[in-house]
Amino acid sequence: MPVKRKSITNFGIKPVGKCSFQRESFWIYGATDILSGEFFYYDFDRMSKENFERYIKDLSENYSNSFNIILMDNAKIHNLDKNPDNIAFINLPSYSPELNPEERVWQHFKKDLGYGVLLLPFKQTTHKSIIYSYFSKILYLILKRIAVYDDIDELKDLIYNKILNTNKKILKSIVSYSYIVEAARALKLI
C-alpha cells in the first residue's frame, strides 16, 4: 500500500533536486614505434584539437630526424590545420579500434587498474568495508574489481609508472601488427 505524504510541489510538477558530481579526468596522447617499442606520451587535462596539435608538434620536434607515420581514428580533433613535414597520418575506418595498435597498448596499461576507476575521498580499506557492510557478497565481489584511488594524481602516477616501467620489447610485441609491418616493408620504409 502506498504511503501518503505531503508533496513539496503542486500536483503534476516534478520536484527538482540539485545535485552535482565532481568529476576529474585527464587524457593521455600516445604513440609507440612498431619497430623498437619506443614511446612518446603526454597527458592533458582535456581532449581538444589544440592539445592534439601541441602533442603532434612536440612529437615532430622530438623525432625530427625521422619520417613518422601515425595511424589514428577519425576523431574530429585529429584534423590538423598544418601537418608537420616529417609526419604522415593514416586515418583508420570509423569504429574500428581493433585496427589501431595503440588501443592495445591502452588495454595493456588498463588491465591492472580494474574494470572501472572510482575516486573517493577516503581510503580503499574503508571503502571495501563500507561496501561489504551494505551490499550482498555477490555485489561486493563485483565491486571489488573497481579500482579505488584517493585522487586523480594517484591514478596519474600509477599509469605513468606503468608506462615508464613497461619493457620496450613488450610494447613492440603489442603494437607490431603483421599487416602494418608488411605494409611498411612493401613501401620500403623499413
Image (cartoon, helix red, strand yellow):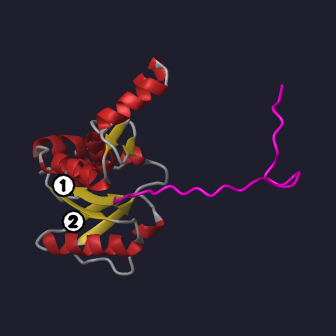
The label shown at residue 33 is 1
Q: Earlier in the sequence, mark 2 or mark 1?
A: 1
In percent of the image, x 11 and y 42: which residue is there?
Answer: 169
Distance (Cα) linking label 2 and label 1: 9 Å
Q: Is residue 64 above or below residue 149?
A: below
Is 132 situated left or right of 40 in this image? Answer: right
Q: Amino acid at mark 2?
A: Asn
Do the CB atoms of the residues marked 2 and 1 lie less than 8 Å apart?
no
In percent of the image, x 49 and y 25: which residue is there?
Answer: 135
The label shown at residue 68 is 2
Quadrant of the image for the C terminus? bottom left
Residue 26 falls in image quadrant: bottom left
**SS of the residue under disc 1:** loop
Instruction: Answer yes or no: is residue 38 visible.
Output: yes
| Residue 185 in picture, x, y percent from top left | 20, 52
Is 35 situated left or right of 125 in this image? Answer: left
Q: Which residues are magenta?
A: 1-26
Closest to the observer, 91 or 122: 122
| Residue 131 in picture, x, y percent from top left | 43, 29
| Residue 166 in picture, x, y percent from top left | 14, 44
Q: How many marks?
A: 2
**SS of the residue under disc 2:** strand
